[in-house]
Structures are given as structure tokens and as C-alpha cells.
Amino acid sequence: MSLFTRTTREVTEKIDEFFDTIEIGILIFKEGVKAYVTGDQDAFQSHLKKIDEQENKADALQKSIENDMIVHSILPQQRSDMVKLLWQLDEIIDTAKGSLFEFYIEIPHIPASLVDDFISLSEVSANAAEELVPAARAFFRHPDQVREKLLKVYFFERETDKAGLQLKKKVFHEMNDLSLAEKAHLRYITHHIESISDTAQDAADLLESMAMRQML
Amino acid sequence: MIIFYITSGLFLGWTLGSNDAANIFGSAVGSRMVSFTRAAVIAAVFVIIGAVVQGAGASDTLGRLGSVNAIGGAFTVALAAGITVYLMTRAGLPVSTTQAIVGAIIGWSLFTNNSVDTKSLVVIVSSWVTGPILGAIFAYGLYPLVKVIRKRINVHLLFYESYLRTGLLIVCAFGAYSLGANNIANVMGVFVPSVQLQAADFGIFTLSGAQQLFFLGGIAIAAGIVTYSKKVIQTLGNNLLELSPEAALVVVLAQSLVLFFFSSSSFSAFLVKMGLPGIPLVPVSSSQVIVGAILGIGLYKGVRNINLKVLGSIASGWITTPVAAGLLSFFLLFFVKNLFGIDIGHSVKPPSAPLDGKDIGLIIKYSIIVLLIITASYLVYMVLAEKKKTDRVNKKYY
């Protein structure tokens, strides 16, 4: 009996740590984009390093939780959904890390007039992912509250779409001084940032159905 | 020689273990919450304890149905029941040892020109109906209770699952104990009148002759659980209804309670003391009770979840089992008597010609009661199913 409880406690701690890692990763992403677009290279490099560490940690935790679930037959009937959820949450931090690395490798030129737009876009996209974590935590204790919490994820995802659309419209309709290559590059970076909220939405859909089944 | 004769009972015990015992932890294993090995070991231990400690009550009732008065007859009756259950188990059908042994005893009574105790038969057959209905009622009542507890205790899902797993192991142990107590009558009941063993004094406790037989029968059941119950679990655990761990817990608990009530003389005496009618101590079919309990859960969740085809195939086994066992018993007795010249028993109480008015009155009385119970259950079922459907249509997600 004590063996069951110890294993269970270890796995719950790992799950909590995994969520913490995702949350921290999202915060680092927001700060990283802000540092890049404002030209603070030292801070950007530091955030880049940190998000890489967090992403590696999330990967290791995800694998470890999956292994524990199989070895100790934890949540046998929901295991595939759980594995998928963990994978999608990990995908969020992967995408966030990927976005910061796009800035690092491709060094996109961000015109001063677009700084606020990029900050705003990255914040609203990251917010969608950020709001997903409390909903995922709630699934384990209060599945009846999951849907309510997910409303914010859907809201921020829609806001991201709007912000992305506005930014792209501004780039292509108003900024005639930019070359087509620069415009296309900015659009590409915008898409990458937007994909964080899209991944969060996919995870939210899965989480919602899992919570519904839990409630039946 | 006695050892040779009781081998057929041990064989029947083995088939019971491989078939009926799967009902106890089939749902838990089917829901993948408990490993087969762990469940089998727990069930094997507790089934023996239940058989020895509390096996006498139901055995007396079965003895009244037809007291097989020669060990050769007891051997053949148990063999016929065992073969019937084994063959049906091989065919992948969840069958009942209770029905098989009742059919086989009736076959013996017909062959030896003994009368069948109509009252005992009616009581036993009635339990075939009341058992699953009680199982359904318990499951229907317990399931929402478990859901409410889940909501109230507010623990992490993984801890809740861990508690549920422990709960499943506990109810499996209780279920195995009740199965041993209730169904040992099917395995060794026919041998009690003809095998007289001396009481064994172990210092701390004494085992009567019947208890020693029950102990042997318990070991045979345990052997059946360990060696052959996995296949039946696969049929019952997954085909009838997709069970959540909570539902599995409720199903096993409901079934265990029914088996326990039908074998506990103390509980029956308690009811009588309270001025209520006592519960007859009869061997109940755990296969029927589990179907009832699963139906109770299905009823709570909405009828659309139930695989009615599987349910129908199980129900057909309830009719074919006693008929097949009865016929097999009759023919085996013929060969054992005429080919080997073994005493298979003699007529003590020839049947009166053909049924007296009292018997007919009793049959009519119980038939009406059974009919009323079935009708009332069907009506309740229809009302609840309709309500569930309406709720589903009106209900939003939460």
C-alpha cells in the first residue's frame, strides 16, 4: 500500500513539475521576444539558454511520466489521452523554443513601428498557452472546472489570430519601405509565434473531452 | 476410494474457479486496474477461507433439493455438472455452476425415482431471478454514491485512482470470500450426505467433516482461478459493457453483497430478529448477479452502452446449462450403474403422483411472485431508461 502511495506521489510531483516547466518556459518566451525586439541582446541570449534548459527538462519529465504510467499501470483507461496531452503540452514549449531560435538564427529585422505589435502578439499567444496550464492542473482535481478555465485559452487564441492578422496587414499594406523578402520573413516569424496558441487550442480540445469523460 | 470419488467434485470446483470466480475480479482486471496475477492470488486465498468458514448454509439448502445418498451418485452428479460447465467455458460462454449442479441433481432424482423437493427448487430458482435483480439494485444505488464521494473527497486523480485500486482489491477479497461461502455448496454439497469424515482437531480450531470437504473444494476452486479464469475474464470484462474503474468497483461490491447475503446465516437471523423475512441460504449464480450488477450500471449510464447481444448469449446459457447438465447426469448415471455396477443411490422419497395440490399451489404462488418482480423491474427499467434519454437530450455538457 505504501509502495502504491509512494509511486503515485512521485508521479503527481513529476506532473506538477512538468506543468511548472511549461509555465516557466512560456514566461521565458515572452521575455525573450521582448528582449529581441527591443534590441537587448544579452537578455535575449540569457532567455535563449534558459528556454533550452526548460525544454530539455520538459522532455525528460514527459518521458519519465509516460514510463511510470506504463510500468505502474497508472490511469490505464486514460493512458493514451494522457500521453497525448503531455505530448501536446510539450509541443507548446518546443514551439516556443523554436520561435526564439528562429529569432536567433534568422535575425529578422523588426522595424521600430512593429515592436509593440510583436510584443503584443507574443504575449497574447503565450497567454493562451499560459491559461492552458491551470486548466490541465484542474483536470486532476476539479474536472468540473476545466471547461470554465479553457474559455480563456479559446479567447486568447482568437485574440492571437486577430493580432497576427493585423500585424501582417500592417506589414503588407502600410510598410512600403520594406522589401518583399523582409515582409515574407516577418510573416513567417508571425506565423511561428501564432502557432503557440494554435497548439494550446489543440491541447485544450483534448483536455475538454478528457474532462467530459471524467465527469460522466 | 473416497478420494477417487470426490475427484469429480474437485473437477467441478476447478471449473467453478475458472468460470464463476472470474466474475469476482473480471471487471477489475477488465478495467486494467488490477493485474490478473494479484487478483487471482487474493481470490484463491479468500475463496478457501469463505468455503471453510461460511459454506454450510447454502449447502444445506442444496442437500434438501435432492440428497444424493450414495457416493457413486454424488461422483456422477458432480462429474456431469463439471463437464457441462467445462465445455461451456471452453466455448467462451459465462455459465453458472449453480444451474449445472441443480440440473445434475434433478437428473439424479429422476434416474433414481426420487422426488424433487419442489419448495427447495422454487427457492433456488427464485434466487436465479432475485439475485441479478438485487445485483442491479445494489449497483444502481452504489454507483452514484461512489460518484458523489469522488466529488466530495477532492483528491488528485492519481491518488483517487490509487485508492480505487486498493478498494478493488479489498472488494475482490470480499467477493472471493462470499463466492467460497455461497458456491462451495455447488462443489461439495452433493458429497456431504454420503461422505462422513471425522472432525479434525487442530488445537486452536476444529474442522468438521463437511468443512474438510469444503476445504478440499476450496483448493480446487483456487486452482481453477489460477489456471483457467483468464479467458473468461476476457469475455466478461470487456464484452458486456466498457467498465470504468469506479463501475468495476461497484459491480464487484454489489455482487459480493448479494452472494454474502444469500450465504450468511447470521445476517438472515438478524433480519428475522428485526421482524423482517429471512434471506434463504441458497447457492446463487455469480454469473447472473454480475450481469445484473453490470445492467444496473448500464441503466444508470443509459441503455445505449450495453451490448445486448452478449447479454442475450449469457441468458441463453442459463437455460441450456441446467438442461444439458440434467441430461448428461441422467445418461452418466445410467452408464455408471449398468456398466460399472456402482451404487449411484436409491429411492428414498418417490415422487407422489404426479404433483399434489400443495406443490402446484406453491409453484403458482412463486411463479406469480417472480412474474410480478420481472414486470415491476421491467417497468422501472423502462421509466429510468426514458428519463435518462430525456435528460441526455436536455442536458448540456455540464
Image (spheres, grey):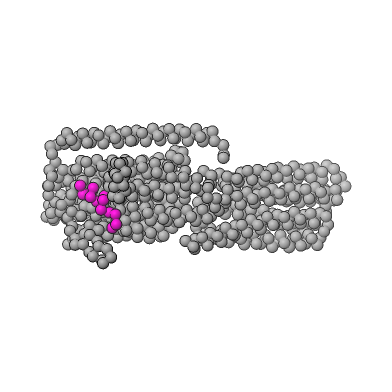
Residue A13, position as x, y percentages in the image: 59, 59
Tell me if I can see residue B29 in this picture.
Answer: no
Image quadrant where residue B362 sits? top left
Please give the name of the residue rendered at 47% of the width and 61% of the height, measured from the top-left corner.
A1
Q: How many marks?
A: 0
Image quadrant where residue B309 sits? top left
- In terms of secondary structure, what is the magenta stretch mainly? helix
Indicate whether residue B54 is drawn in magenta.
yes
Horizontal arrangement in the rendering, residue B269 relative to residue B388 (left or right): left
Which residue is more in the foreground, B204 or B106?
B204
Image quadrant where residue A152 sits? top right
In the image, farthest residue toward the right: A177
Please give the name of the residue rendered at 12% of the width and 52% of the height, measured from the top-left corner.
B338
Horizontal arrangement in the rendering, residue B246 relative to residue A53 (left or right): left
Which residue is more in the foreground, B205 or A140?
B205
Residue B196, position as x, y percentages in the image: 17, 58
Residue B98, position as x, y percentages in the image: 28, 48
Start-end of magenta stretch: B52-64
Horizontal arrangement in the rendering, residue B326 relative to residue B252 (left or right): left
Horizontal arrangement in the rendering, residue B2 relative to residue B302 (left or right): left
Tell me if I can see residue B296 in this picture.
Answer: yes
Please give the name of the residue rendered at 44% of the width and 35% of the height, measured from the top-left corner.
B385
From the viewer's perspective, is residue B383 above or below residue A196? Answer: above
Please give the name of the residue rendered at 76% of the width and 44% of the height, measured from the top-left corner.
A163
Residue A92, position as x, y percentages in the image: 67, 53
Which residue is more in the foreground, A21 or B261?
B261
Indicate whether residue A176 is drawn in magenta.
no
Which residue is more in the foreground, B203 or A92?
B203
